[in-house]
Image: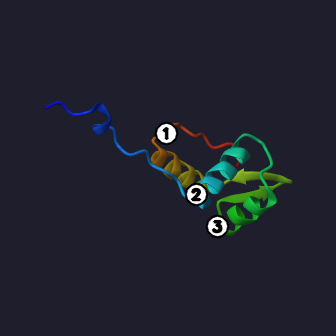
Amino acid sequence: MEKNPSEFRKRKPILSWSQCKRLGGIVSILMNKEPIEEIVVHLKSLNMIVEHNNNLLVNESGMQEARRLLKITGISLEIKKKGF
């Protein structure tokens, strides 16, 4: 008896709402966009971004979190750090 091809597929990983907001905020900052103030405050409280000369920059812990969340979703990208 043959198995249905859909039985071989793995379940797609899903991020929680807070993980989506964190990843979206970090990606926005990396693309030089201003995320929603609520997300900026949250990322600052988690020490993932810093403000330098009125610009938001993603620090190393923010980059690690972005890589981790992208890995969960199955996206493999090389993120290069911009800024300081």
Marks 2/1 in contact by CB < 8 Å: the verdict is no
Q: Mark 1, residues whose alpha carbon is within 10 Å: few (<14), some, or many (≥20)?
A: few
Q: Nearer the viewer, residue 42 or 17?
A: 17
Quadrant holding the N terminus: top left
Which amino acid type is shown beneath numbered disc 1? Ile
User: Residue at horizontal 77%, vertical 63%?
Assistant: 38
Label 3, label 2: how many angstroms apart (C-alpha)? 12 Å
The answer to which image quadrant residue 3 occupies is top left
Whole-percent x and y of residue 22? 63, 56
User: Residue at horizontal 17%, vertical 30%?
Assistant: 2
Which comes before the other along the chain, label 3 or label 2?
A: 2
The answer to which image quadrant residue 33 occupies is top right
Mark 3 lies on a secondary structure that is loop
Q: Mark 2, residues whose alpha carbon is within 10 Å: few (<14), some, or many (≥20)?
A: some
Residue that badge 3 annotates: 46
Q: Which mark is residue 16?
A: none
Q: Is residue 48 above or below residue 5?
A: below
Whole-percent x and y of residue 43? 68, 62
Marks 3/2 in contact by CB < 8 Å: the verdict is no
Residue that badge 1 annotates: 75
Q: Residue furthest right?
A: 54
Residue that badge 2 annotates: 19
Q: Residue furthest front?
A: 1
Which comes before the other along the chain, label 2 or label 1?
A: 2
Mark 1 lies on a secondary structure that is loop
User: Residue at horizontal 46%, vertical 46%?
Assistant: 71
Q: Mark 3, residues whose alpha carbon is within 10 Å: few (<14), some, or many (≥20)?
A: few
Q: Nearer the viewer, mark 3 or mark 1?
A: 1
Q: Residue furthest bottom?
A: 45
Label 2, label 1: how many angstroms apart (C-alpha)? 15 Å
Image position of 31 (left or right of 23): right
